Image (spheres, rainbow, N blue to C red):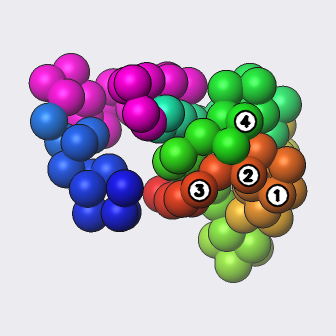
Amino acid sequence: MTPAEACIALNMLPTMGPVRLRKLLQVFETPDRVIVIAGDSTPKSDVLQNCNECDVLIHEAYTQASFEKVSPEWKLYREAFHTSTRELAEIASRAKPHLLGTC
């Protein structure tokens, strides 16, 4: 599945949208594909368990550049409740998705 096909598949789901993607760990399975979406989640979530060589992993992550621009309070919040791109790289190296996307 290409990234474009994954986006088309997600857009076809009637209940998905920006509000619905918040605080989400969702696994979509078909007979030949597994798609895992993790939004607003920490590296300690169940992503590894659900994406064990899954076909597509889409995971929310913040960049170090955006982290440096926020207040100390927001930095603490992000570290406690979100995933950095560095942490996502560690997750992906262990979960081994065939395709990784971030938002």
Secondary structure state at the residue bearing disc 3: loop
Secondary structure state at the residue bearing disc 2: loop
- Disc 4 crowd rating (10 Å Cα; few below 14, some 14-19, many 20+) is some
Q: Which residue is mark 3?
A: 98
On the image, the x and y values in percent for residue 96 come to 73, 52
Amino acid beneath label 4:
Asn
Magenta residues? 13-33
Q: Earlier in the sequence, mark 3 or mark 1?
A: 1
Picture quadrant where residue 13 is located: top left
Q: Which residue is mark 2?
A: 96
Instruction: Give the Cα distance between marks 2 and 4.
Output: 7 Å
- Disc 1 crowd rating (10 Å Cα; few below 14, some 14-19, many 20+) is few
Q: Earlier in the sequence, mark 2 or mark 4?
A: 4
When the figure is inspected, residue 20 is found, relative to residue 59, above or below; the finding is: above
- Disc 3 crowd rating (10 Å Cα; few below 14, some 14-19, many 20+) is some
Amino acid beneath label 1:
Ser
Q: Earlier in the sequence, mark 1 or mark 4?
A: 4
- Disc 2 crowd rating (10 Å Cα; few below 14, some 14-19, many 20+) is some
Q: Are marks 3 and 1 in contact (CB under 8 Å)?
A: no
Q: Are marks 2 and 1 in contact (CB under 8 Å)?
A: yes
The residue that appears at 27% across and 40% down in the rendered structure is: 10
Picture quadrant where residue 67 is located: bottom right
Q: Which residue is mark 4?
A: 52
User: Mark number for residue 41?
Assistant: none
On the image, the x and y values in percent for residue 44 come to 84, 31
Q: Which residue is mark 1?
A: 93
The residue that appears at 67% across and 69% down in the rendered structure is: 63
Would residue 9 be counted in the magenta stretch?
A: no
On the image, the x and y values in percent for residue 19 come to 31, 30
Instruction: Give the Cα distance between marks 2 and 3.
Output: 6 Å
Q: Are marks 2 and 4 in contact (CB under 8 Å)?
A: yes
